[in-house]
Amino acid sequence: MTGEKWVRIITAQTPTNIAVIKYWGKRDETLILPINDSISVTLDPNHLCTTTTVAVSPAFHSDRMWLNGKEISLAGGRYQNCLREIRKRASDVEDEAKGIKIAKKDWETLHVHIASYNNFPTAAGLASSAAGFACLVFALAKLMNVKEDEGQLSAIARQGSGSACRSLYGGFVKWIMGNNKDGSDSLAVQVADEKHWDDLVILIAVVSSRQKETSSTSGMRESVETSLLLKHRAQEVVPKRIAQMEEAIKTKDFPSFAHLTCADSNQFHAVCLDTSPPIFYMNDTSHKIISIVEKWNRAEGTPKVAYTFDAGPNAVLIAHDRNAASQLLKRLLFYFPPGADTDFNSYVIGDKSILKDAGLENMKDVESLSPPPGDNSTQTYAGDVNYFICTRPGRGPIVLCDETQALLDPETGLPK
Amino acid sequence: MTGEKWVRIITAQTPTNIAVIKYWGKRDETLILPINDSISVTLDPNHLCTTTTVAVSPAFHSDRMWLNGKEISLAGGRYQNCLREIRKRASDVEDEAKGIKIAKKDWETLHVHIASYNNFPTAAGLASSAAGFACLVFALAKLMNVKEDEGQLSAIARQGSGSACRSLYGGFVKWIMGNNKDGSDSLAVQVADEKHWDDLVILIAVVSSRQKETSSTSGMRESVETSLLLKHRAQEVVPKRIAQMEEAIKTKDFPSFAHLTCADSNQFHAVCLDTSPPIFYMNDTSHKIISIVEKWNRAEGTPKVAYTFDAGPNAVLIAHDRNAASQLLKRLLFYFPPGADTDFNSYVIGDKSILKDAGLENMKDVESLSPPPGDNSTQTYAGDVNYFICTRPGRGPIVLCDETQALLDPETGLPK
């Protein structure tokens, strides 16, 4: 192969996901094995996804990676674990059109280039590492003709970032904690696909924060070491909730879904608070959003919206249907109008049709919103939310066949 | 007795207390019986106390009460329980000097007037009901010559407000949850008096809040009904902490005391968050104060300050000694200088000698404070704290013999 000039290239797109029954705590730090099952909703990759192009060529001298255009080191254990596990499973590849022939054993010496791009701010606390590692593993598996199915790939992605394993499927996904010491049975399965419950609308409030947050990796380690409530949660509370949540999803029982989602988000944050030193991911704005939703759900007599918060102050709000979503958006924009220097058009992004449903086409419409029934306060919090993203449950990873979407040059294998 | 004009009057002063192992959750709502033991520190009544004057006269036509100068209804069950239980235990009273003679059975028909005054804002979330009910019961007991000791009185005060039972003693106090169905063994005992560990200095940050808080009565009821973590806390976690805390107090082991105090405050708030709907008592300012203390304690290698928060955003900070307290005050005033319209003199109240120790005599001294070592941020939060109170562990209830301190007129039995 030496001296050859070919470049084999694959581009894939992988969604993020938001847990509705939370993963918090590892029983094995290296293999990333959790102390409880978790369940997530995959988010529509049209609005939140990672695109990753991987390339292989005998001309490459080392494994290299670019994230959002900037070269980063692959030396970390998490990248190395994923690369090693995928390489182990590589098969013969033959691309007659391009005259490429790679034997299984060649993969041990061939190097790869990886370019990855998130269509949302990496630092916004929107599970970029979940989509990122899922996409890395999925794209490499396609490149190397790995025969394993998504479930088995999920067990590899898990070693990059725990929650990444849940991004290998669309719809509703369960990460089974597994029992094996080697982690081979700690993988994701699909509970239901994205078409099963397609009324749901998801609204994400990206919340301004003045505090630097604890990383989820160190946060969950500290919780495992110091929280006296976490073990009880993992062993006694979560197993029941997992069964109830699967049932709620399968039967599209929104009240149960909403109750479990909110309760489990709150319990996760309770465990963070029970950690020493305590971890605060939610802030006053997060609390205010919860109050708005709780009050509305109570007034309606049945939940219209579920909320869940990951390791940061952003709210992920899951509305029962488009009607509930448009009402929710009106309420949220009443309390959280855009800040003085924010353009309305960039304040609500993603699926803007919800804005239309709500009759909100410009800043004037927002200004003329009235307080929700039963709220006599007129206090609003302009600037406390950076922006909103409207989305929905979405599909799993796909290969993008259109070469114009590749992030690496098909000739050089370097970033375009 | 009919037609007689005498008024018998007693004035008492009772401290507030702050729990270091928290009470959260009742097993009996009427008798106010808790689901776990708790331990508190009594605060110096010179800075935070309730003064209550009680009077009896054959000329009174009904039981009446004035709180901070305003007449309030005594019809509530909590007042009625206290009045009934104290009347039951009344004895003969003879005051030869005033020519007053009251037989045990007369108390059934005699009416009382009660006037109560807090030397701190009632609404500030500083356990005013604890001091208030303790003082009511203590003063009435003295008025009616009740022979029961403080422990037995505490079981009566408990029926007014649970935490009131811990205000019947100075120093460090344990409320034993008890086992009896009638609550007769659910009472307070003194762990150590206020002289035992008199190095401690207590600093209270009264924090501004934009949110209306859930009352602790309804909050703890909702936690008992919905939190899946509370039972585990009450049954598995607290009993061990109570034993450890008693030991820490007896041996004046500040690191253990601080660790337990902080962890238990955080766990109480964790349980609030695990409640449905979730209860948030701490806000971003509370979180910031915790971060300041945690960071400093970590930097010192051993805790200098413990923090604890009740059902509200106010921080109660317990410093190891005067030196730690003055350093703490400097740090807090750096991050939380007085708001623009706040007078420095009314911003730090109570024992002002700590201000002197810290070399802070005026606003200029505050302005020239530099950030604590290791903090490169210069972000400060003027106005986020309303004011600070400097105090210390203090004594239990006393009778004030000086009649000029009475809140009722000795002739008419009406508010002065």
Image (cartoon, coloured by chain):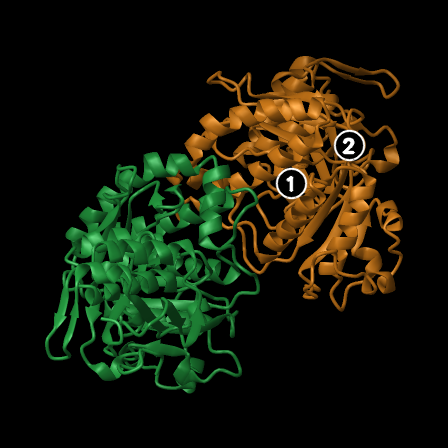
Chain colours: A orange, B green
Q: Which of B66 and B283 is in front in this view?
A: B66
Which residue in the protein does label 1 denote?
A127
Considering every residue shown, the one lying at the far front of the view is B2
Which residue in the protein does label 2 denote?
A394
Q: Which of A54 and B300 is in front in this view?
A: B300
- Do pointers 2 and 1 mark residues of a single chain? yes
Residue B73 visible in the shown view:
yes
Q: Is mark 1 on a helix, strand or loop?
A: loop
Chain under callout 2: A
Q: Where is residue A123 in the image (x, y as percent from the top left)?
A: 64, 50
Which amino acid does the dot numbered 2 rest on? Answer: Gly
Q: Position of residue B275 (x, y in %)?
A: 51, 42
Picture layout, residue B291 above or below residue B389: above
Picture layout, residue A143 above or below residue B382: above
Q: Please give the count of numbered marks on the rendered protein.
A: 2
Residue in the image at 28% along x and 53% along y:
B85
Chain under callout 1: A
